[in-house]
Image (spheres, grey):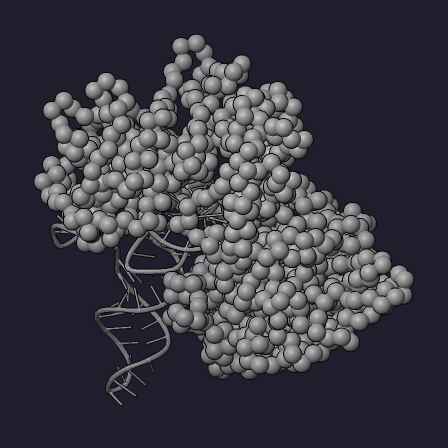
Amino acid sequence: MKYDFQKIERRWQKFWREKKVYEPLNMTRGKPNLKLSTSRQKPFYNLMMFPYPSAEGLHVGNMYAFTGGDVYGRFKRMQGFNVFEPMGLDGFGIHSENYALKIGVHPMKQAEISEKRFYKQLEMIGNGFAWDERLETYDPKYYRWTQWIFVQLFKHGLAYRKKAPVNWCPSCKTVLADEQVITGRCERCSHLVIKKELEQWFFKITKYADKLLKNLDKIDWSERVKIAQRNWIGRSEGAEIEFRIKNHESSIKVFTTRPDTLFGATYMVLAPEHELIENLESSINNLEEVKKYVKKAGSESDEERIAEDREKSGVELKGVKAVNPATKEEIPIWVADYVLGHVGTGAIMAVPAHDERDLEFAIKYDLPVRQVVEAEYTQMTEPGMVKKELPFVERDGIIAIIKHWSEEKYIGLKWKSVAWGTWVTGGIEKDQTPEQAARAEVLEEVGYRNLRFVKDLGIVHGKFYHVPKKENRWVHAHCLYFELEDDARDEVSEKEKAIHELTWLSKEEVERFLTPSTHLWAWRKLCGELVYIGNGYLKNSGKFDGIASEKAKWEITKFVGGKKEIHYRIRDWLISRQRYWGVPIPMIYCERCDWQPVPEKDLPVKLPFIKDFRPKGKGQSPLASEKSFYETKCPKCGGAARRETDVSDTFLDSAWYYLRYPSTRSAHSGQVPWDPEITKKWLPVDMYIGGAEHSVLHLLYSRFLAMAFNDWGLVHFKDGEPFTVFRAHGLLISEGKKMSKSKGNIVNPDFYVKKFGADAFRMYLMFLAPFEQGGDFRDAGILGITRFLERVWKLFNNDKKDKKDIDKNLEKSLHQSIKKVTEDIENLHYNTAISTLMILLSKMEEQGDKLSTGIYQTFLKLLAPFAPHITEELWSQLGSKKSIHIEPWPAYNPKLIEEETFKLIVQVNGKMRDTITADTGISQKEAEAIALSLENIKRHIGNKKSKKIIFVKDRLINFVI
RNA sequence: GCCCGGGUGGCGGAACUGGUUUACGCAAAGGACUUAAAAUCCUUGGCCCGAAAGGGCUUGUGGGUUCGAAUCCCACUCCGGGCACCA
């Protein structure tokens, strides 16, 4: 009989659906309620991130993720857990809307089409989903509760409106949360994001910043995701210090992580949006200039602000001075856009000697630089300790140098990728010209560091500038630009050779190469080298001189009356979107009563069908043009009022879906968002599998909401955490590259499923590489799996099954395989589990005609999570009426795994010289005797005596001579 | 720049707690079956020297610790990902 996977797969998918094999409820009495199903079985909530229905249908990446999750779910089910593995669609949002826009279909229509297609595809891959509990976020029955959650957040003071500069995507025509801005670009469309001043709804995620951070230590999550969250939350410890303004009642508050450098604060900077600028207006002499700068900074797009080759700029507030609370010096106040309004207090104390950015600014505007942290002492604090020299000591000299340098006097070298080097110290020998000295030095440096890459080394035309440092010594700073020829990879062994090959480039060539951005970039490098940001010991700091900087931090804070503060990088979650395809924000604005939530009984606020759903781009949702939608009455006073027309971020939909799944069919699903009784049994989620790309989006938002729900008594999770275990799967790439349409390497899953079958496709995906690492999809590889499945089919159809219970010859391999496969699946090492099964199959084939039913059964069970259809088919052929997927997982007998013999490695001086088969548990004496009788060993040892013999039990013996 | 991963045959990847590097699979070569091809089955294989026995080298590079290092430590380098004027 031929292995007809199409027929088999279709048949069993139908069977599973009809018999509701994967509905946890059916494992008891078939009652349509998850409440009743858990009395005798252990519930196991196996969750995977639901997909956004997108343009091309289900992506292989989705399939990869779901299959990985499903293998685990099936494994747990067979281990006797009552597994709940739901699936749904995250259908709202810009992603789906943009697709609808692109093809010119209304998103409501498109949702219906996508839904069908997605569910069909999802069934086709044969995952054990609990179909009865599926949900779609655009279903009013679902989003009613999304709105309800919004209202609760508002009532608890966690949802608020505020006017703030927000991220605006000009292409998607909506605002975005910080988390959705990826390196200055929109997460969805990659368009550059600009800043816009708008009044928007926010969720106070910052209230939970500390808990979100601390709980990370308590949960079993992929470490890389935890790290990403830690970085995103960005806790920093520092001090808040107030700087008085001379002859003025207001003061400037700054947050700094380095209060120990306070004595080095030589000026202050306010962000252009800082409110103090307005307050100080009357005292500012150059108000015009300042206003102009502020206006310019405000109007500038982020594109300009982010630009890499942007030089720092600013304007001094002339006529006002701040007082450094430590030194009592009067220091200038500047306004500059390198200080961001939303970070810290929007103002900084600038310490140019110990902050790269401040130094860059100070050099440009000729502001004083004072070094206050001197050096690092070597570990010991005992007397006689050694002091390390700081690379930059002669500040005045350096400024002078940089000034020269910034007048574009430099030397350069011809290299490939632009590299750089700076030399601040050095000297000129008596009879050397400065050029010769510099050239020698360059060669020394270049030769020393990079000589092996230099073939065609040429010194660019240039001049060297020197600043007298000491008598007959010179300091010269050069910024060097290298360019290495493409083919110049050959190593040059001798420095002399390099010297010999020196050639001068023409001035034109140099100038073409030295663009302003190269220039600035090198300047920053130089600043970076000059600044000392490490810890050390204080100097120029009055009575704090000599104190370790770590210690000085809090002493100085205390001294100036500042206070210790914890600062988080994370900002509140911007929730409103000026788009159509989302959950309408359930709020009403009344001129008399201010913002009022829609009464809970009136929920949901249904998203109306409107013809023109295109984003308008004026900071308003298309709903704002629908009178019938926004005209309403104030729930408080009954007067005329206006609905909020923005919709909420899609990430709100997905931040709580896991709570809804088990309750979708509860008798109370219409009265409560989640049934408390069911929730108590099934949650938190036992295993959550998804992509690491959601590290700081979905996963952080979900945790935040769960914590709030916990505080309100709506859920009772341990530590308020919704996902006990989370594992991030790796990225599936194709032909060594990230999949993308432009590269033309998109893998179409439907094609493979059709051609090779779902089982083969699933198994191949799992076999590629470790699941958590991600893998490289190569067409040809799937043939190996197809062959494997064909062989399985053939073996099971050879009709030579024996009734006897065990095959003695295979018993050991079988039990070893059970152990290995069990452990591998538990650790998501699916690739090695599959290879174990391949080895086992080969051994079974070798046995040929005398296999027992027992071994067939066990093999099928081990294979079942990976290839659910073929195993189900063969299982039924073995005479069972019950699904294999609810059969108990095989156990192994530890006694049967032990080997009687092993290969003893015989080494001489740590090199393997021979191996012998020895009985397990052999003693050192016996091993020595056997080993020494080996010809090859005798030869290597000769007549020398072993100094030492290393014996590792059941592993090796090593003679050291 | 900072923070994470990672570097092992022609390729995807194995390797327990430091103990035979290259399991399993792909691709390749040779053979069997076939008129032929496909499919299937069998055999081979890190690199270098050697007829073989055997020896030398080999897990990005250079050092170190160790009887012994892919694995631990230090420095460097390359690739992938994330964050980025966060005070």
Residue A500, visible in the rendered structure: yes
Q: Position of residue A427 (x, y in %)?
A: 22, 25
- Report the residue at 70% width, 44% height from top: A207
Q: Is residue A337 left or right of residue A240?
A: left
Q: Position of residue A416 (x, y in %)?
A: 24, 50
Q: Position of residue A707 (x, y in %)?
A: 73, 48
Of B79 and A362, the residue lying toward us: A362
- Report the residue at 36% width, 23% height from top: A393
- Can you say whether A749 is above or below A516 in the image? below
Q: Is residue A946 left or right of residue A666?
A: left
| The residue positioned farthest toward the top in the image shown | A383
| The residue positioned farthest toward the right in the image shown | A637
Residue A30, visible in the rendered structure: no
Of A75 and A241, the residue lying toward us: A241
Of A899 and A725, the residue lying toward us: A725
- Report the residue at 52% width, 52% height from top: A296
| The residue positioned farthest toward the left in the image shown | A500
Of A451 and A65, the residue lying toward us: A451
- Report the residue at 43% width, 63% height from top: A738
Quarter containing the C terminus of chain A = top left
Q: Position of residue A542 (x, y in %)?
A: 52, 16
Q: Quadrant of residue A838?
A: bottom left
